[in-house]
Image (tube, rainbow, N blue to C red):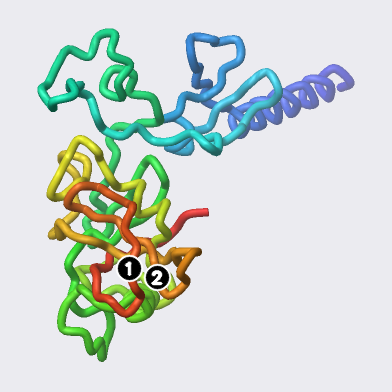
Amino acid sequence: MKHFFRFLVFCWLLLFATTVFAQTKVVVIPMGGNKAVGDATAQDVVEGKTFSSDSGTGLTGTRSPGIPATTGQTLCYDTVGDQISCTGTGQDGEVQKGVAVTPRFINNGDGTVTDNLTGLIWLQEGNCTTFFAGDAAVSNSRPWQVALDAANQLASGYCGLTDGSAAGDWRLPNLRELQSLVDYSQISPSLPAGNPFLNTVSSDYWSSTTYALYTNYAWLVNFSNGSDSYYYGKSSSYYVRAVRGGQ
């Protein structure tokens, strides 16, 4: 009887250990060939994969702050603008530093686009004219405060959205968020090739960021050439693309 009891205890412990192991099993994603450490690659962490390291298991990936995205440039040019071989130039097209993920964007099929690089969820439609019931504007282009209000009141049922979102879920992106969409190898619009966005106007889009020198101005990003050096008076009318999520 004693041996039978010990056998039952052993079976219970074995079952418990197996269950715990199954619950804590992790995917080890090595980086830079250093499999002993098992850190995640840039793409693994922005995708939120689980990984382990010498210091622990079950860790989830978060991209280190301060790592910029790639610009999108893969070609090199001389001083008169002719394309040349990138080898030894030190140009962006040769070095291609920064974080990149593939695929960059996911079309969610509900009027939204997920950016796998930043984790932000963007409104797919780039030229919506009616953001909410009673929207008095007759076009997407509108003054800054009206643009802020439109983005804040956006909800499912408007601008092609069928995602179930409610007013208050969406907002006008800040300058850094808006800049993150720019691909500097593209023009008109300056978005990554093959992106799923619709009707992006090759013009200026408002950010929610005020220009500190003159606080009656706000920053914009121009999606014709990707420039973000523009700031205009808040009473001027420019385009709106809403975003949600982010940290």
- Which one is in front, 187 or 79? 79
> Spatial distance from mark 2 to mark 1, Cα to Cα?
5 Å
In the rendered image, residue 115, in percent from the top left (x then y), is placed at: 34, 46
**How many discs appear?**
2
* Residue found farthest to the right: 2
Image-quadrant location for residue 11: top right
Amino acid found under the numbered disc labelled 1:
Tyr
Residue at the extreme left:
82
Query: Residue at left 53%, top 32%?
Result: 50
In terms of depth relative to the viewer, which is nearer, 229 or 128?
229
**Left or right of 62 in this view: 115:** left
Q: Where residue 186 appears, x then y in whole percent?
A: 17, 40
- The correct choice, above or below, for 3 with respect to 25 in the image is above
Number of the label disc, if any, that sits on residue 232: 1
Mark 1: few/some/many CA within 10 Å (<14, 14-19, 20+) = some
Q: Pointers 2 and 1 in contact (CB under 8 A)? A: yes
Q: Residue at x 33, y 23 (%)?
A: 96
Q: What secondary structure is marked by label 2?
A: strand
Residue 80, placed above or below residue 192: above
Looking at the picture, tell me which residue is in the foreground, 126 or 86. 86
**Residue 64 visible from this viewpoint:** yes
Quadrant of the frame with the N terminus: top right
Q: Mark 2 or mark 1, which has the lower sequence index?
A: 2
Element class at badge 1: strand
Q: Is residue 158 visible?
A: no
Which residue is located at x 40 percent, y 31 percent?
Answer: 99
Residue 8 place in picture, x, y as percent: 77, 25
Residue identified by numbered label 2: 217
Tag 2: amino acid? Tyr
